[in-house]
Image (spheres, rainbow, N blue to C red):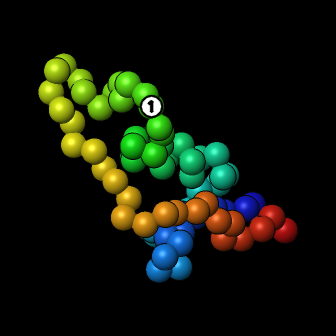
Amino acid sequence: MSKFGIMDRVTHQLLLNKSFKSRGLAAQWLQKEYPTLIDTDNRQGHYLGGQSQPELVLKHPVQIVCLSKKE
């Protein structure tokens, strides 16, 4: 079974010691943990109940990479 990870493109290291079963699951995790990756015009979701929520921002660009192939 293939495994995917999230690599920091500046340091060339894995962002965290976590692997995903598919590229889609890795992308879903990124969008959940770092909602600022999704570009929205009105920034809905960042302000809940009239209170500003802290935004999590990645320091470097990341890439979803294949860690192992199906055999």
Give residue 21's quadrant in the image: bottom right
Camera-nearest residue between 50 and 66:
50
Q: How far from the left and from the top, in percent, is residue 55?
A: 28, 44
- Which residue corresponds to the image point at 40% horizontal and 41% vertical from the top-left? 35
The C terminus - image quarter: bottom right
Tell me the residue at 49%/76% (across/down).
10
Kind of element beneath mark 1 = loop
Q: Quadrant of residue 5 in the image?
A: bottom right
- Residue holding disc 1: 40
- Residue at screen point 77% across, 68% down: 69
Frontmost residue, 69 versus 28:
28
In the rendered image, is residue 35 in sight?
Answer: yes
| 15 and 35: which is toward the camera | 35
Q: Is residue 4 left or right of residue 52?
A: right
Q: Position of residue 18 (x, y in %)?
A: 49, 63
Q: Is residue 66 above or below residue 34?
A: below
Residue 70 horizontal/vertical position (percent) = 80, 64
